Amino acid sequence: MESTGGMIAQVIARDEPQLVRKLILTGTGPAGGEGLKNVSRLSRLDTVRALFTLHDPKQFLFITRTAGGRRAGEPFLARLKERTHDRGKAISRTSYFAQLKAFHRWGLAQPRDLSVIHQPVLVANGESDRMVPRKNSFELARRLPNADLVVYPDAGHGGVFQFHEQFVAEALDFLGR
């Protein structure tokens, strides 16, 4: 569903900088960021909507509802079904609800000083991310002294999946510098 990796990565880079050389943060925002406390509510609503419409919840959570967004999202959803052997285990209900609780707490948390993170950081998000509004990506990049920002057009929370070829190229370029 969603990863708390962006939140954890920020804490590790800030508190244990010797463990991090470079950082890629996608679809995440700073603690206390605008709208982040709503991730749990949006996730629950979109999951229920998916159940009633017989769609994959990712279509609502990760992809814009525009024609272009749905067109870009279809290959992403198809790729998820390609691998049939040795797939990762599905998240448990307990873990899913713990994750939503962590997002809510992150959204309510006091902002943290990110100016102490001096490692290069690539921040990426979709321009129409409902779960982590793009304003948070701009704020995150602004508060990190050595950050590059990439925003994918007509993309939601799954912007890096919808534009995976472009994102991989940008990530490799970033990591190679």
Image: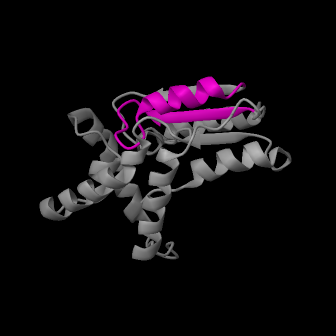
Which range is magenta? 120-145
Identified at 38% across, 44% down, the residue is: 131
Give the camera-side residue of 46 and 63: 46
Identified at 43% across, 67% down, the residue is: 96
In the image, taking residue 141 as reference, residue 51 lies left or right, namely: left
In the image, taking residue 86 as reference, residue 42 lies left or right, namely: left
78 to 90, vertically: above or below = above
161 to 119, vertically: above or below = below
Identified at 51% across, 40% down, the residue is: 32
Which quadrant is home to the N terminus?
bottom left
Of all residues shown, which one is farthest toward the right?
Answer: 18
Give the camera-side residue of 167 and 145: 145
Colour pattern of the rendering:
one colour
Q: How many marks?
A: 0
Residue 2 is inside the magenta segment:
no
Which quadrant is home to the C terminus?
top right
Residue 134 is inside the magenta segment:
yes
Residue 5 on image: x %, y %: 59, 53
Identified at 48% across, 41% down, the residue is: 160
In the image, taking residue 78 as reference, residue 32 lies left or right, namely: right
Q: Quadrant of residue 83?
A: bottom left
In the image, taking residue 88 as reference, residue 118 lies left or right, namely: right
Residue 156 on image: x %, y %: 36, 39
Residue 4 on image: x %, y %: 54, 55
On the question of residue 150 being in view, the answer is no
On the question of residue 140 being in view, the answer is yes
Residue 134 on image: x %, y %: 43, 31
